[in-house]
Amino acid sequence: MPDSAFPASVAGPADRGNPPGHWCFARRFPAGDRETRRILADLIDGLGQAGVGEDDRSNAELILAEVLNNIAEHAYADGAGPVELRVEVQRNGLACQIADRGRPMPASDAPDPSLPLIAPPDHLPEGGFGWHIIRCLTSELRYARDHGWNRLTMHMPWSGYD
Amino acid sequence: MDISTHRSGQALVLTIQDSRVDAAVAIDFKEAVRNAAEMESGSPVILDLSRVTFLDSSGLGAVVAVMKLLGSDRPLQLAALTPPVAKVFRLTRMDSVFTIHAQAPGSLKAVG
């Protein structure tokens, strides 16, 4: 993946008149809860204008919220830093790229945890669900550490096609 | 976090007025729901989520945390999950942990 595939700023829904496959959202922003909310609201609005259905918009919002929360909480546990997000509408779903300059992933790979043990009343986990949710709703998830950047790419298939 | 409360029979119903329960508000949510539950009597405590259109794993964790805080004397139940919220419970199998009502009691009274 060349660096040029990751524009440093804005694309936005400028190609709305073009067929699906051309719509692309790209932003660079500081990691953190407030920015995450703002960017997700922009993305969901844009996906709606691009004709992406409600179920797929809410899947995208959930997946990217989990990814961006992880970046803020873990990759940038020591402080702030930039995030680059790129989402492209394709024929068979959404292609997403997320990059940050924080700590590398443990074990140099994206986590793939099993669902935490749920056995009430003694075992009621309050966390450990984020990567499970991401993995449930995406395919072709790849992680690379590249020149100080964490780069995640993933595919979100359209929900109606399974 | 804006929460309205009402009694329905023995139950205390807490209606979350915010549309998002996410990482930005998870701690507030936990405190606000606990405080609202402790200010009124009533059991079970039913969380009316009909206005919540987004909940992530941080929000889910906060709901579980509230359930633990309230303990077995005041079981926490859920009501009126919107499709995106129901999906999170289903994907994490947390739908097996909670009693989930299709609608909050007393929430859909016919007018007139």
Image (tube, coloured by chain):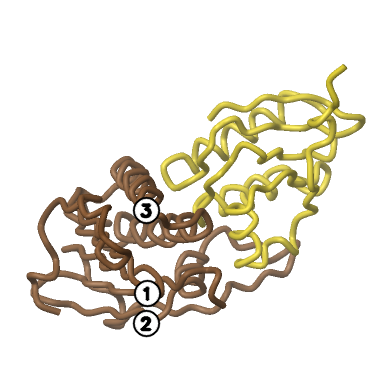
Chain colours: A brown, B yellow
Q: Residue at x 27, y 56 (%)?
A: A77
Q: Of marks 1 and 2, which one's residue comes earlier in the chain?
A: 2
> Circles 1 and 2: CB distance less than 8 Å?
yes
Name the residue that disc number 3 marks.
A47
Answer yes or no: is residue B100 visible.
Answer: yes
Q: Residue at x 60, y 52 (%)?
A: B85
Name the residue that disc number 1 marks.
A155
Q: CA distance from mark 3 to mark 2?
A: 21 Å
The verdict on a common chain for dots 3 and 1 is yes
- The answer to whether residue B7 is left or right of residue B15 is right
Element type where label 1 sits in the image: strand
Q: Residue at x 83, y 26 (%)?
A: B7
- The answer to whether residue B81 is left or right of residue B61 is right
Which residue type does callout 2 highlight? Glu
Q: Which quarter of the image is occupied by the N terminus of chain A?
A: bottom left
3 or 2: mark nearer the eye? 3
Q: Residue furthest top?
A: B112
Instruction: Find residue A142 and name its label.
Output: none
Name the residue that disc number 2 marks.
A140
Number of residues whose C-alpha sits closer than 10 Å to that of mark 2, classed few (under 14), some (14–19) or many (20 or more): few
- List x then y, in percent, for residue A159: 53, 68
Could you say which quadrant of the image residue B16 lies in? top right
Could you say which quadrant of the image residue A97 lies in? bottom left
- List x then y, in percent, for residue A80: 20, 50
Element type where label 2 sits in the image: strand
- The answer to whether residue B70 is left or right of residue A41 is right
Q: Which quarter of the image is occupied by the C terminus of chain A?
A: bottom right
- List x then y, in percent, for residue B69: 67, 45
